[in-house]
Amino acid sequence: MPLFPLLVIVLVFLFVVVAWRLYRMAKALIKTVLVAALVILIVGVALLYLVTSQEVVSSIEVLNRGGDQGTALVVYHPGLTGFHERVTSAFADGLVSNGWRVEMTTASPYAPTDLSSYDLLVLGGPTYFWTPNRPIKSYLSRLGNLGGKRTAIIITALGMGERSISTMERLVQAANGDLVKSLLLYSLAPNEDIYGINDPEEIASQVAKGITPPRR
């Protein structure tokens, strides 16, 4: 056989062998990358769940100590970004503007469970994994029977919170709470379609102002 055709055959053979080995190595590398990405995702989700499930302990902050139109207890979880805390503070300010005395604290075992001195209970928390986060649900569970207590709920989410607020509404009603306001606010999705304005803090304040004080 002439030398040139033989050389071509050898080169083609070597090319096929190298290409096949590279293909097998690439497949192994892709599999390794996919497995590593899956492990990182699982660990990340688990860590997010653990972090968002942690209760935050805080003292009771009293707003408008001289308020004579009723006393509201606001119990919330601040969340990871502070968005929910800002919305809750705006809601509390709205109550204060109507003469309410407001006590605010985070959802923890140290939050008040005797509601006899309060005219309104406000419960709030951010949405994680399409449900209200664990601390606010745990606090509501510790309260037990709300005995018809007037209750408002504030749920925040990035953009899909319908399931979360429905869950919270069901929990309050199952606990025999008198649900007077149910507020869902988004940090990324527009709020204007629901409330006519987009500013979540302004919405929270306006909704709070619409809660009538108890009759004296």
Image (spheres, helix red, strand yellow):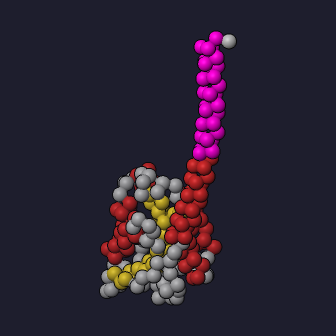
Furthest-right residue in view? Answer: 1
Report whether 128 appears left or right of 74.
right
Report whether 52 appears left or right of 66.
right
Most foreground residue, 153 or 35: 35
Q: Residue at x 47, y 88 (%)?
A: 117
Question: What is the total number of numbered labels drawn onto the structure image?
Answer: 0
Q: Residue at x 33, y 78 (%)?
A: 99
The answer to whether any part of residue 133 appears in the image is no
The answer to whether any part of residue 216 appears in the image is yes
Residue 96 within the segment the image draws in magenta: no
- Quadrant of the snapshot with the C terminus: bottom left
Residue 202, given in percent of the width and then of the height, sits at 34, 62
| In this view, 91 is above or below 30 | below
| In this view, 91 is above or below 39 | below
Residue 147, given in percent of the width and then of the height, sits at 59, 82
Residue 4, given in percent of the width and then of the height, sits at 59, 13
Q: Residue at x 62, y 28 (%)?
A: 14
Furthest-top residue in view? Answer: 2
Most foreground residue, 66 or 216: 66
The majority secondary structure of the magenta stretch comes to helix
Q: Residue at x 61, y 52 (%)?
A: 35
- The image quadrant of residue 148 is bottom right
Most foreground residue, 163 or 78: 78
Please provide the residue range marked out in magenta. Answer: 2-30
| In this view, 21 is above or below 69 | above
Residue 14 within the segment the image draws in magenta: yes
| In this view, 203 is above or below 91 | above
- Quadrant of the snapshot with the N terminus: top right
Residue 106, given in percent of the width and then of the height, sits at 45, 78
